[in-house]
Structures are given as C-alpha cells and as structure tokens.
Amino acid sequence: MVAIPLAVMSVMASAFVHSVVSPAQYVLSEVQRILDEESSRMDAITRIAVIGFSVLVLLAASALFIFGESLLEFVIAVFLLAGIVAMSGTFIRNHVSTRPLNERERAACEIGAGQDVTFRVATGEFGQTINGLAAGVFPAYKIILINEHSFEALDDEYIAMIAAHELGHVDENHAVVSLVEAVVLTAPSLLSVRYFVQHHWMLFLVAGSAVLVGRVVFAWIRRRLEYRADRYAANLLEDPHQVANGLRALRDARMAEIADEQSPGSLYERAIRRIRHCWTRILSTHPPIDDRISHVERLMER
C-alpha cells in the first residue's frame, strides 16, 4: 500500500519540477535572449514587461488555487489561466525569434494565403529543428510558425504539406483543446499542493492521480487531432499522396538528425531508453510518423 502513495508523490514531484523549474529557466533564458538581441531599449523593456506580467498572472492564479477559500476565487483563477493560454499566439509571436517569410517561403506556403492566420518563420535555437507550430485561439492572435531548418531540409511541396497540416489545427480550432488541457491539468496540480500543505493526504492522492490520468487522456485526444489535421491537409491539397510523401520526408529527415542518439550502448542504457520510449509514446501529443503515414494511405484507398 505504501508503494501507491510514493508513486503518486514521485509523479507530483516530477510534475512540480516540470511546471515550476522548467518555466523559470525558460523565463530567465528568454529575458537574456531579449537583452542580447540588437533591438531598441523600448522594445526590450516592452517584451520583458509582457513576460513579467504573464508570470505575475500565473502566480496570482496559483495563489488563488492554493490559498483561496471561496468559489469566486477559484473561478477567477480558472479565468486567469484560460486567458494566459488563449493569448499563447501573441506570446509566441513576441518571445520566439521569428521573421517574415521571404518570396520563396511565401510561395511554398501559398496554400494558406487566403486564411485568417499569420505565417512566420521561426529562427534562432527554436528554428533549428524540422517542425511547424500553430497557436492562438482568437482570430487576431492565430499564428503558424514553420521552422527555418524545415525550409532548408525539405522541398517546397513538403513545406506546403506542413502548412496545410497546421492550417488544419487552426481552422478546426484545435488550440481550444490545449487551452482546456492547460486549465484542467493545472487546476488539480495546484490543488494537490494545497492538500499537501494542509496534510489532506487522501485528497492529495486523488488530485495527483487525476493529473496523471488527465495527461494520458489529453495526450490521446491530441494524437487524434493530429490525424484530423493530416486528413484536413489531404483534402485541402486534394492529394493524399503529397501528404504521405511529405510525412515520409519528415520522418527521414528526423531520423538523420537523431542517428547519433541510436547507438547500442550498454544493457542498462538500452533498457532505460526502451522505458523512456514507451512512456513517451503514452504521453506524446503526436502519433509515430509511420502511423500517420498508414492513416493517410488508408485515405487513398477510399
């Protein structure tokens, strides 16, 4: 019986590190990046002020969850969390190094020219992988980023596939799921801290277990949304073969990037890698690319 509480406490400890330490490191590195950029002092002050305001809002919401006593305080905390996530498109626009698309990149993303969404190219450290990202709930804040390295590693037809896939997330408002997930998972995480401080061990275990189950459930939902975005891209491009070929190119490029990490290693290293791989698949927000390819290929047969 002791193993169950210990397991839940270890999960909550890792969640605390992930939820507090990692964002704190990100905030500090983000402030340092803004200070290192060659921009005006007013622009740097404004962007750092936005970061500071976001942190204060999150701290206020956390304090209300942990120390609040009335239902109104909990409702306000939920709205604060929802507001921060809903503005994610703006935060990404301000805090990720981006630039406008050049002529060649605009041509590759022409499929989204008539859509009510902003396309930008992610540069800097964030832009060095092959990826695309859609964010923002409200039309004025919707943004699609395509990493700079994607344009370097992939042909234009595959970039068009990435753009169409991300447009699927935008057009079907998949960001709403991320908003709900952030609020639903953050609330019991903060409540678990409250119950831990108050020594309500049963409620602490219930809240911690709810966070773990919620992460698994939302990860499964978001994997379903990736399949939907692939179907949307196939319909928008009117060519499932282009989507399947784009996914293959994406898979091959990523495999080349991580080839050095696939060394055999010791028995212990292989075991740890396999455990991590299984756990990652359970909590991953994206299905394996081979599964996505198979899904698109089934669309071709219809």
Image: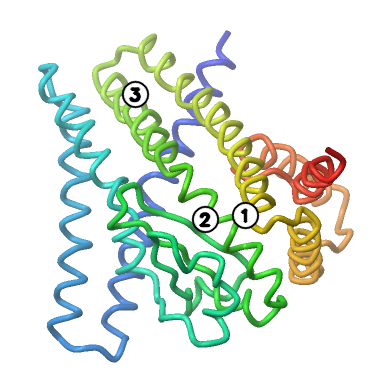
Counting from the top left corner in percent of width and height, residue 75 is at: 17, 25
Please give left or right for residue 206 compared with residue 61 in the image. right
Q: Secondary structure at mark 2?
A: helix
Counting from the top left corner in percent of width and height, residue 67 is at: 15, 26
Q: Quadrant of the C terminus?
A: top right
Given residues 230 and 204, the one toward you in this image is: 230
Residue to which mark 2 is pinned: 167
Amino acid type of the residue tagged 1 in the rendering: Leu
Residue beneath the point at 44% across and 73% down? 120
Comparing marks 2 and 1, which lies closer to the viewer? 1
First-in-chain label (3 vs 1): 3
Residue beneath the point at 31% across and 85% down? 36
Comparing marks 3 and 2, which lies closer to the viewer? 2
Amino acid type of the residue tagged 2 in the rendering: Leu
Given residues 68 and 177, the one toward you in this image is: 177
Tag 2 and tag 1, C-beta contact below 8 Å: yes
User: How much space separates mark 2 and mark 1, taking CA atoms?
Assistant: 9 Å
Amino acid type of the residue tagged 3 in the rendering: Ser
First-in-chain label (3 vs 2): 2
Residue to which mark 3 is pinned: 192
User: How much space separates mark 3 and mark 1, taking CA atoms?
Assistant: 44 Å
Comparing marks 3 and 1, which lies closer to the viewer? 1
Please give left or right for residue 212 compared with residue 71 in the image. right
Counting from the top left corner in percent of width and height, residue 57 is at: 17, 47
Badge number at residue 21: none
Given residues 191 and 167, the one toward you in this image is: 167
Q: Quadrant of the N terminus?
A: top right
For residue 179, above or below residue 67:
below
Given residues 56 and 292, the one toward you in this image is: 292
Badge number at residue 236: 1
Mark 1 closeness class: few <14, some 14–19, many ≥20 residues within 10 Å? some
Counting from the top left corner in percent of width and height, residue 286 is at: 64, 45
